[in-house]
Image (cartoon, grey):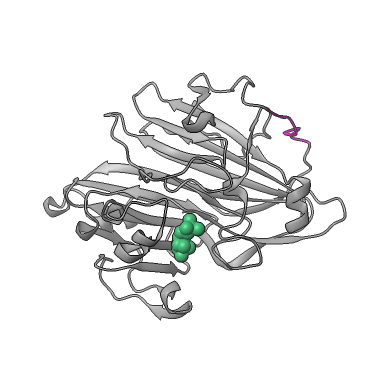
């Protein structure tokens, strides 16, 4: 999988976007009302896995395996009311990650209403998934006042044959005055875990990271898997394309594969920050971990007409680490 920026003619006619009542391309996708009457799209794969995406923020709030088990964490205190972003699931940080710029924290894409993209340009690579939805975001006049750049942000959310969850973002600079723009980006994924103190993250050993708890000072990670016993907020730089999150108690391993997103953010607020967040339960830090495929260290610059693609594929595989059934090294370095 190679990250790519392409000069696209735009003739893919993907200009058509429509309200929630638009017919969906996939037979396994359905628009319905979610919390507070917000529109959401429910994806149900015939083999049993499912996912839910709110048009508000193009925000994935549920991903279930073929046993109906929820794999993502959404806070019991999450507010589904603009302008607040939904606490949990997969918020999309664009055009700014965190406070790395003059915009609001994590940019504005996560608290805008997206529309269904009824005629997206074809994908360069054919996808085997028949269960998907295409959403699109374009800047409003208000957005142009805070970030004066024309863009089209297309997001495809798909369920793969094995129940994998795939998010593919295509961001195109549609400026007519030839102005380039730069942005940072993250899929701010909240994984549901049984007990954070029993979780290990593999694939980030020995890498450099910026510590958000120490003014983004740069450090080098030690050689072992990452475990959790206090607040963590780190931006790992130039990571491998595969990261494994092992939930020992649930005998489950999440494998995150990413493309076009060189960095990875690891975050757990722990107890104090948890208490400080109104839309987060005091004890909920024990049952979530954010591992975020991101482009943070180097912002992405698009010339007029250029398009960037950033992809994340999540798999949840049964594992019993101790039995060696799933050796993370095999996961990370194997097929
Ligand atoms: O991705 C980690 C992080 O940037 C943390 O610093 C923390 O602020 C977290 O995101 C949540 O941000 P939010 O704006 O959703 O409260």
Considering every residue shown, the one lying at the far left of the view is: 323
Q: What secondary structure prevails in the magenta region? A: loop
Query: Which region of the structure is painted magenta?
Result: 11-18
The answer to whether residue 268 shows anywhere in this view is no
- Image coordinates of residue 140 in percent, x first then y, are 75, 45
Residue at x-position 27% and y-position 51%: 287
Q: Residue 243 appears in which quarter of the rendering?
A: bottom left
State the count of labels: 0
The relative height of residue 26 versus residue 252 in the rendered view (above or below) is above
Q: Nearer the viewer, residue 14 or 329?
A: 14
Is 13 a magenta residue?
yes
Residue at x-position 64% and y-position 21%: 22
Q: Nearer the viewer, residue 164 or 329?
A: 164
Q: Nearer the viewer, residue 23 or 19?
A: 19
Asked if residue 194 lies left or right of residue 155, the reply is left
Q: Nearer the viewer, residue 210 or 318?
A: 210
Residue at x-position 48% and y-position 45%: 86
- Image coordinates of residue 132 in percent, x first then y, are 51, 30
The relative height of residue 51 versus residue 96 in the rendered view (above or below) is above
Is 138 a magenta residue?
no
- Image coordinates of residue 237 in percent, x first then y, are 47, 69
Asked if residue 319 lies left or right of residue 18, the reply is left
Asked if residue 183 lies left or right of residue 151, the reply is left
The answer to whether residue 214 shows anywhere in this view is yes
- Image coordinates of residue 34 in percent, x first then y, are 48, 29
């Amino acid at each position: 999988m190679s990250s790519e920026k392409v000069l696209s003619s735009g003739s893919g006619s993907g200009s058509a976007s429509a309200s929630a009542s638009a017919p969906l391309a996939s037979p396994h996708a359905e628009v319905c009302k979610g919390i507070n009457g917000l529109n959401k799209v429910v994806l149900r794969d015939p083999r049993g896995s499912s996912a839910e995406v709110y048009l508000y923020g193009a925000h994935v709030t549920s991903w279930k395996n073929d046993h109906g088990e929820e794999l993502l964490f959404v806070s019991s205190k999450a507010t589904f009311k603009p302008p607040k972003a939904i606490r949990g699931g997969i918020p999309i940080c664009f055009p700014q990650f965190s406070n790395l710029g003059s915009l609001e924290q994590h940019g504005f894409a996560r608290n805008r209403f997206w529309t269904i993209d009824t005629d997206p340009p074809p994908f360069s690579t054919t996808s085997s998934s028949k269960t998907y939805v295409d959403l699109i975001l374009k800047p409003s006049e208000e957005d142009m006042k805070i970030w004066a750049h024309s863009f089209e942000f297309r997001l495809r959310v798909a369920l793969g044959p094995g129940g994998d969850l795939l998010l593919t973002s295509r961001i195109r600079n549609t400026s007519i005055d030839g102005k380039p723009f730069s942005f940072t980006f993250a899929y701010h994924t909240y994984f549901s875990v049984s007990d954070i103190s029993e979780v290990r993250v593999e694939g980030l050993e020995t890498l450099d990271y910026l510590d958000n708890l120490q003014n983004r000072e740069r450090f080098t990670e030690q050689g072992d898997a990452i475990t959790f016993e206090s607040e963590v907020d780190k931006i790992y730089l130039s990571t491998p394309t595969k990261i494994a999150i092992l939930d020992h108690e649930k005998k489950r391993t999440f494998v995150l594969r990413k493309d076009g997103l060189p960095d990875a953010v690891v975050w757990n607020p722990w107890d104090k920050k948890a208490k400080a967040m109104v839309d987060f339960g005091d004890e909920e830090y024990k049952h979530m971990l954010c591992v975020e495929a991101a482009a943070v260290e180097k912002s992405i610059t698009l010339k007029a007409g250029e398009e960037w693609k950033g992809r994340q594929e999540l798999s949840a595989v049964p594992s019993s680490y101790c039995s060696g059934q799933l050796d993370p090294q095999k996961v990370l370095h194997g097929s």
